[in-house]
Image (spheres, coloured by chain):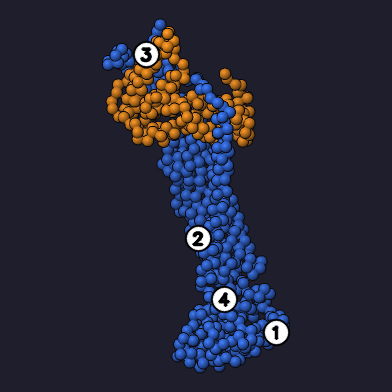
Chain colours: A blue, B orange
Amino acid sequence: MSKIPFDDWLFDRLNDHDSPLDLNTEWEALAPMIGKKEEKRKRIFLWWILGTAAAMLVLWIVMGQRTSTRSPYSQAIQIPQSKQDIQPSSTFIHPSQTISSSSSKGKRISDETPKSKDTNSNLAEGISTNNNSMYYRNLRKSLDSKSHYKNHPFIRKQSTISYQKATNNSRQNKIILSPKMSRNSSLVNMDKIPIVSSLVPMQSKVEYRSNLDIQRITTKPDMQFSTVTQRSISYLTTAILLGGYTRSFKSNSEQAKRYIAQKDQTERLLEALGIEVTYHKALFQSDWHIGMGLGVQQDNFQLYQNFRDTIDKRFDHHPTEVKVSRDLTQSISKYDDVRGKAVYYVHRRINGYRRVLYIPFDITYSKAISLRHRIGFSVGGALGLKTSYFGQVVPNLEHNIWTVNYKQTIEQKLTSSYYFDIKYSYKFLQRATIFVGLRYQSEISGDEGTTFRWQENRKYLFLNAGAKVYL
Amino acid sequence: MKLAEEKILSIVKGCKRGQGSSQRELFRLYAPKVMSMCRRYSSNNEMAKDVMQECFIQVFSSIDQYCEASGIFEGWLHTVSQRTIWRVVKRDWGEKTIYSEQTENTTFTVEPDAFAKLSNDEIIGEIQKLPIGYKTVLNMYVFESLSHKEIAEILGIEENSSRSQLARARQLLKRKIEAKNKTSYVKNTL
């Protein structure tokens, strides 16, 4: 009987062997694990959304904490309701002042009293006559007076806002104090409030109260000040983008067409995300802004292949026959060049990304739908500064078994895009707004491989969220 | 026994839709074959069952990738299982058994009936007793038809190491089978 090689004998015996197995028991053990794996896959995209929401929540909390520590007014000031509520030694003072602790400053406050009182009377007079221009002239005059409180940042800020309101109102006649409001306004009745009329050392509070009341007026719903406060004010936008995208290729080259068809088959798009910081400046009207900034965007993709391929191969100097002595101490080998077929089973998934650093520019129109809520529309574009790739790509049209690094094969030339977006924003702080919206973006880029070129067109739909900080 | 292609494809479609009955059917059809593969690479049957579980988890999680045009399903399943087994072997292997000594290519010849008394399960049992490096290289070379260069790339070892381990695996396995065969022969004749 002829002898056959040991390897062949082993292969013939075991290759088609089926091991006995208790299938029911094994399936019971396996079934729950399959479920978990599937569930995990389905939740990948959900994690991205939850992560963004969590980031927004953290931003909200951090901003809220900063506000509460920066504005102690609401805690320190209690509006007295009656004379009994007011005590000369109470801590009812402006938090940033050291009036009560400094005798010299206290003296100066006493000296300033008439002027402060004038301020209040002027304010009251100005508003009660419903003569707006007079009111704001008086207001500005009073706030620009020699009172040393005028340099307090809070007062200065309010005075600026008030003056802007005044000019705005004088042009547009939008600010109308209702009779009810005039009657009930604490500003109008300032001189009747005990704190003003009876307690001289507390005049600092009067000054402060007047500003509080100005602020209170500005936040009355029937007064359209929200646009005024943002007039000619620049803001910084931080946007977090999250979304999906599609991709298409164009080329006149036949070779490129074959290659990009192969890319279509082997590359799967996962998701795109990015971050963008934009500086906006008010245009000729307050509701229009132009902006420019810097952004980074990352497109995640996956190379996935699953196929079998047979390739003719030549094996140089391959052992063709080996004779071994019975005691395994000696052997004689014959070598020759052998031609054969190599069978490859390819199954792989390699994640990669494309990262673009770009300059966005846009023009934005935003309209107030209420005091805190706005809706905005933007049209813009972006110019790519730098594109980098990470991942694997199939370079070979004939046999796509071997892969190479993406960046070694493809060089991306100029990248440009345009976009439209719509966003809803909510003003949650004096100088901060959060927004959420949708952005449609179309990008065109020129790609160059080792021997041919093609054009790549990407379309994105982003869920757009972020914050605006007014400078 | 080969099933009709249509039946397999309908089972695969059911698996893609996440139907439990189809998944069970697929497992019932292919588990013995995959288990056989896993046993050859593992040290014992319990470990082989663990590896088989990983193989089927991988198969079910990536079954969406399979399309009819890419070949028969059995080939695809074999490839997925093979890759999973290699990954597990590499993980378990660590740095336990890396040899890089020079060994000549040796091929043994056997008479087909010489080891006929041994069952396939007994031969697999002997393979399982080989050191992990030996049996891995032996399996890859004999059953997956990989060259030493490819084995070296997959396992992250030197090509010479692959050659030497294969040679030693053959020697050792043949001795073990011969010894087992004699014992078996004696048992059968007495």
CB under 8 Å between discs 2 and 3: no
Calculate the distance from the C-alpha at mark 1 to the C-alpha at mark 2.
47 Å
Calculate the distance from the C-alpha at mark 3 to the C-alpha at mark 1.
113 Å
Relative placement, left or right, of B189 versus B75 is left
Amino acid marked by disc 2: Val
Q: Which residue is mark 2?
A: A277
Q: Is residue A245 above or below residue B80?
A: below
Chain under numbered label 2: A
Amino acid marked by disc 1: Arg
The answer as to whether the residues below labels 3 and 1 share one chain is no
Q: Which residue is mark 3?
A: B109
Which secondary structure lies at badge 1?
helix
Task: Work out whether mark 2 precedes mark 4 in sequence or the reverse, and give the earlier one.
Answer: 4
Chain under numbered label 3: B
Calculate the distance from the C-alpha at mark 2 to the C-alpha at mark 4.
33 Å
Which secondary structure lies at badge 4?
helix
Q: Which residue is mark 4?
A: A74
Amino acid marked by disc 4: Ser
Amino acid marked by disc 3: Thr
**Image spot of residue B42 (x, y percent):** 43, 28
Task: Work out whether mark 4 precedes mark 1 in sequence or the reverse, and give the earlier one.
Answer: 4
Q: Residues within 10 Å of mark 3 (few under 14, many from 20)?
A: some
Q: Residue drawn 60% across and 85% down? A: A85
